[in-house]
Image (cartoon, rainbow, N blue to C red):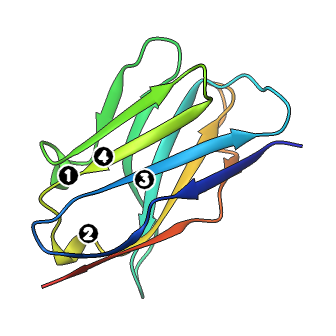
Amino acid sequence: QVQLVESGGGLVQAGGSLTLSCVASGRTFSKYAMGWFRQAPGKEREFVASIVWSNGLTYYRDSVKGRFTISRDNAKNTVYLQMISLKPEDTGVYSCAAQRLISRGYDLWGQGTQVTVSS
């Protein structure tokens, strides 16, 4: 069974930085892309960033461009989200997800890690 396990969340002041990690454990599985999503209290989950596993092509939501960087380590089966210049509006539960087939959406999700940015 494959699991995605996030780590690296925490409490940080505005302007600070955090790096999240997501490890895919269990049996090896193929993946088209990995992504990070977040959900703030009372709001819907939103896309943050994604990376195509084969070629490293990345996508970001506009509000995090220039501040967040998604990357991957193929050997470690891990995806990272480096976040700098954090703002209170970045607060939320951050979850990683896997899109195993290009024809399907994100179908494997982690439990999430809390990121809280204080003003």
Q: What's the residue type where badge 2 is placed?
A: Asp
Which residue lies under the disc numbered 1? 64
Q: Earlier in the sequence, mark 2 or mark 1?
A: 1
Element assignment for label 4: strand
Residue 37 in sight = yes
| Sequence order check, earlier mark of 1 and 4 | 1
Amino acid bearing label 4 = Gln
* Alpha carbon separation for disc pair 4 and 2: 13 Å
Labels 2 and 1 touching (C-beta < 8 A) = yes
Q: Which badge, 1 or 3, is on the more N-terminal residue? A: 3
Q: Is residue 85 left or right of residue 98?
A: left
Mark 3 neighbour density, 10 Å: few (under 14) some (14–19) many (20 or more): many
Element type at mark 3: strand
- Residue behind mark 3: 20
User: Which quadrant holds residue 89?
Assistant: bottom left
Observer-nearest of 68 and 75: 75
Report, in whole angstroms, how far the alpha carbon at label 1 lies from the one at label 3: 15 Å
Residue that badge 4 annotates: 82
Answer few, some or many: residues within 10 Å of disc 2's Cα (few below 14, many 20 plus, some between 14 and 19).
many
